Each structure stands twice: as C-alpha cells, then as structure tokens.
Amino acid sequence: MSPAQPGSKARTDDLQNRLRAAYPDARCALDHVDPFQLVVATILSAQCTDARVNLTTPALFARFPDAASLAGARVEELEALIKSTGFYHNKAKNLIGLGQALTARHGGQVPSDPAALGALPGVGQKTANVVLANAFGVPALAVDTHIFRVARRLGLSKAATPEKVEADLCRLFPREDWIELHHQLIFHGRRVCDARRPDCEACPLLDLCPTGTGKIKDPHLGVRLQVSGWRPEVLQPEAGAAPFLQPPASNLQPEGPQRIISLVPSVTELLVQWGLGARLVGRTRFCIEPRWIRNSVPTVGGTKDPDLGRIRDLAPDLVILERDENPKEVAEALTAAGLPWMALEIRTVKDVVAALRDLGARLGVAGAAEDRARALEASLNRRRRKGPRALALIWKAPWMSAGPDTYLGDLMRQGGLMPIGPDRYPTLSDEELGALDPQVLLLPTEPYRFNRRHQAELQKRFPQARVHLVDGQALTWYLSRTEAGLDLVRSLH
C-alpha cells in the first residue's frame, strides 16, 4: 500500500506513532530542576551543544542559584564560568540582564506568560517556546536546526525560515502533541537524520520521507539522495518506472559548498532567498536579514575586521567577500589560513547580473540564479531619458555622498536619475554640498540613520530640490534587493 499523501492526517498520525516507538526516551536534553535553570541553560545553548551546556551549568548554578544572585554577578566571573559555551561576552551580558529583569519585574520568578517571557533579555521565540513547553507544560514547538532540517526533508514544510516551519508543523499536528513532537524530531535529527550523512537505511520513517526515497532533492544538502539496500516493503516503484541507482549514501557529492560564511549582508540575505540558509555557518554582525538568522547563525565579527580565529573554528568550505566592503587584508588572511574564498566586485547594476551568475554556478543553484539574472537584465533594457540631477548622501558630520561610479550611483542612473558629485565616497564641506545644487536629494536610512528631522533641515536648505527619505537597504543592498532599489528610484520621478 502506498504511503498517505504529505500533509494528510493519516500520514501525520503514522509518522508520530513511529516516532513514539523509535524514541520513547525523547525529552529535554538540557539538565534543569526549575524554570530559572532552564531559561539560563537554553540561553547558553545558542550555537553550543546541549552536552557542553550540561557540563557548564553545575558550577554556574552553584555560584548563581537564582535570579537575584545572577543580577549582581560580575561580568568577568560570569564569562569565566560560561566561556566554553562560546559567544560568552554576549551571553554573560544577556544573563545578567535576565537576572535583573526577573528581579525587577517578576519577583525573581520566570513568567509563564509568553509575551512577558519573550521580553526578557536573551530570550527569543525559540528560547521562550522551549521554556514554556518544558517548564510550564504550555504547548509550544520550538524549531531548532535539527527540527528545521528534518521537517523539510520529510516534506512537512517547504519554508525557508524556522518561524515558518514552526507555523507549518503547528498546523499539521494537534496542539497536545507539540511538546512531544519537538523532542522526537530533535532525537531523530541527532540519531538518524544527520545534517551531512543521513542514515536513511536505518530510518523508521523512510517510506514517509520524500527526500529519503529520492522523490525530491535534499533541501539541506541540495542533492537527490540515493540509498542502497532498499527494503522491499518500503519502496514500491510505479509500474514501468526505472529502478533507482543505489550508490552508498556515504558517497554523496553535494552540489556546491555546504558550510558558507558570508561577510556581506546582502549576500547573506540572497542565500536565504535561494533556499541555502541551512548552509550558512557564519556571518558578520551586520548580516541581520532575514531576522531569524540573528539567533541561528553565529557572528564572526565585523565587515572590516572579522574574527579570523572564529572563522577558522567554523571550518567553512567557502567564505564570500565583496571588494569594497571587505579589506584586501581579510582575503590575504583567509589565504594564509588555507580557507577558500571568493570576492565579488559590485560597482554597477550590471555587475549584480554577473555576480548572480557567478554565485549560482559556485553554489550549485545556477538555474535560480539565471532566472533572476535574466529578469534583472530585462528590466535594464528600458530606454532612459536624461533625468534630474540627484545626490545620495550616506553620512552626516561630515557629509559623505555616493559618487556616480558607485553601485548606488549606477542604481540611480538606471532608475532615471543623473548622479552628481565626486567619484567614490567623498566627504563634502557645507560649501561643497551647497555648490552641487541637487534637484533630487536622497537620504537613505542606512548606513547613516537619516530621519525626518534631517529631511526637513535639508529641505529648508535646498527649497527647490525634492528631498526624499528612502529605505537604505533597498538602495544599498545589491543582489538581494537590487530590484527593490530600481523600483524605488523609478518611483521618485
């Protein structure tokens, strides 16, 4: 008999019955005795194994047994106790803030209200769900990296973010089963459905899994799994269908690099748009979109000064840079460390088209890249009349602008404006700014946070000009938002 269709109640019931049989010991892997210990342990577990957290917390709780003691902790002492969990500077700051917030707002007790819990320092949606489910028995289904991977492989969700995967799972399974399912899927991800080498032959869910049976490409690895030793009762090919070739799973050759560090915010966002978010193992602190990566993908420092030691520890098989955003010294250091990298150079919108194709070929998603590149090329073939003289400011005190030879300058040109001012990113005195006499003045919301007050001040200074406060990400995030930037510029005139 063929398995029930994906998403059907019969299939989800069957899947959970098998998970119950396979993992009767499924439970929260973080050792704790009360809600306070659980919320602390969950904060420490970000980008760290549960086993490492469990080795760390006994000494931590012996020294800081409650919210009041944690609120008064010295940051140096706390960092020393939790250093082995990684990212200890930020975690220590969050833990002290957590203790202070619990003491000041909740009498030292962890609240069971989702909104109040989520408002605590260091507590995002995932952490709140873990605490609600395991400390208070409130049905919740936190999606970590294991559940994200397993749910997509099982065809339970096609979503590209943990939040959307969570929503899909909550729609498919009864509310009373969410807590149990959370632990079962994590156990399955750890014991069988490994990120790099899934043990499909030993999987109790194989005939329910479109990835394991080769019906779809693995959404995590980007290849079609072909498993040797099929059990006859599991796979019943349709009449006339060609048999599967069956090389061992250990010989899988994923398409493109699987451990990517992006040092470019717009590239990070583009990879997620292409469905490659699971391959991201590192980002700079300026790579903040989409929002879920802020809690899911570790940071490696800044754009100009990334932490090479942290990059090396993450063992990437590709680091992506951009020549204007990342100094030459960063590439030289990566080469010296034996780490593979590629550097983009984006000065024009046509450079974006070329970069899309280069990235698509390198990452094994040439089809998606080509579709986007062709669509962008087509939008550039419009005839453009000579537009108004336009200046884009990118900083204040001192004034700085984006010149005609920059990506932003070319974006304006392609959108029908005439970029003015010196080339590259010059600083301008008040007199030099006035002498440019722009007809259109753009104030992006980043990298400098121009606001309505700045807009009003400059409108007074240039009464004949049109002064626009505009979305900085649309204007400056090439690759992921070039189309949005073109639409924005074209809408201005």
Image (cartoon, rainbow, N blue to C red):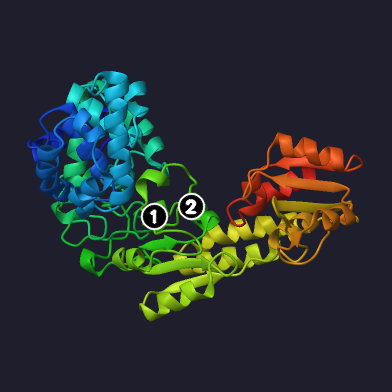
Give the quarter of the figure containing the C terminus. Answer: top right
Neighbourhood count class around disc 1 (C-alpha, 10 Å): few under 14, some 14–19, many 20 upward? many
Nearest to the observer: residue 310 or residue 236: 310
Q: Position of residue 329 (x, y in %)?
A: 49, 75
Against 230, residue 71 (above or below) is above
Give the quarter of the figure containing the N terminus. Answer: top left
Q: Are marks 2 and 1 in contact (CB under 8 Å)?
A: yes
Q: Position of residue 120 (x, y in %)?
A: 34, 29
Quadrant in which residue 34 is drawn: top left
Left or right, residue 97 beside residue 385: left
Q: Is residue 248 visible?
A: no
Against 448, residue 34 (above or below) is above
From the image, tell me which residue sits under label 2. 287
Amino acid tagged 2: Cys
Neighbourhood count class around disc 2 (C-alpha, 10 Å): few under 14, some 14–19, many 20 upward? many
Cα separation between marks 2 and 1: 8 Å
Q: Position of residue 266 (x, y in %)?
A: 55, 55
Report the residue at 36% width, 63% height from top: 258
Residue 299: mark: 1
Left or right, residue 70 beside residue 279: left
Q: Is residue 285 visible?
A: yes
Report the residue at 10% width, 30% height from top: 33
Amino acid tagged 1: Thr
Q: Earlier in the sequence, mark 2 or mark 1?
A: 2
Quadrant in which residue 256 is drawn: bottom left
Left or right, residue 320 beside residue 72: right
Against 146, residue 98 (above or below) is above
Report the residue at 85% width, 55% height from top: 431
Q: Secondary structure at mark 2?
A: loop
